Image: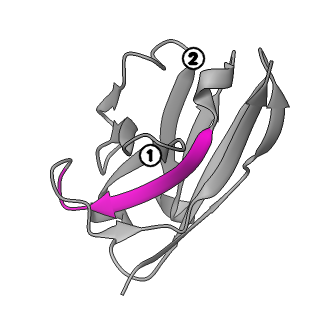
Amino acid sequence: QVQLVESGGGLVQAGGSLRLSCAASGRAFNMFVMGWFRQAPGNEREVVATITWSGGRTSYADSVKGRFTISRDNAKNTAYLQMNIMKPEDTAVYYCAGGPSTREYVYWGQGTQVTVSS
């Protein structure tokens, strides 16, 4: 069983930065694709960024390209989402997820609230 725990959420002003962390316990973290998702009230959950097991390939939603960076440290079983130049529309609950591919996320964290004030 793998458990994912997000941290680092909070309140930030527009233009500011936050770094989210996703700590994994259990087996085979370094074999998983990791992804960050978000869901704002009234909206569907959307993918924000993904990263392959080696960290060699990343992808981003158009809305965050150039502002957000996904990374991982397999030695620490942790994935990160660095969020810069934040906008009020980035306000959402952010979730990390892991799985064998970008089309199959098996493990999910509990979510962390991110609020960007204007």
Amino acid, disc 2: Arg
Chain part drawn in magenta: 92-101
| Residue 18 painted magenta | no
- Badge 1 marks a residue whose secondary structure is strand
Q: Residue 40, position in %: x, y?
A: 53, 41
**Magenta segment: does it hold 95?**
yes
Most foreground residue, 27 or 98: 98
Tell me: residue 75, above or below residue 81. Answer: below
Tell me residue 16's x, y (percent).
80, 21
First in sequence: mark 2 vs mark 1:
1
Q: Quadrant of residue 78?
A: bottom right
Residue 18: image location, x then y, percent? 73, 35
Residue, disc 1: 36
Above or below 113: residue 13: above
**Quadrant occupied by the N terminus:** bottom left
Name the residue carrying label 2. Answer: 67
Closer to us: 30 or 105: 105
Give the residue drawn at x 26%, y 60%: 105
Residue 7, by quadrant, is bottom right
User: At label 1, which amino acid type do we have?
Assistant: Trp
Left or right, 85 with reference to 59: right
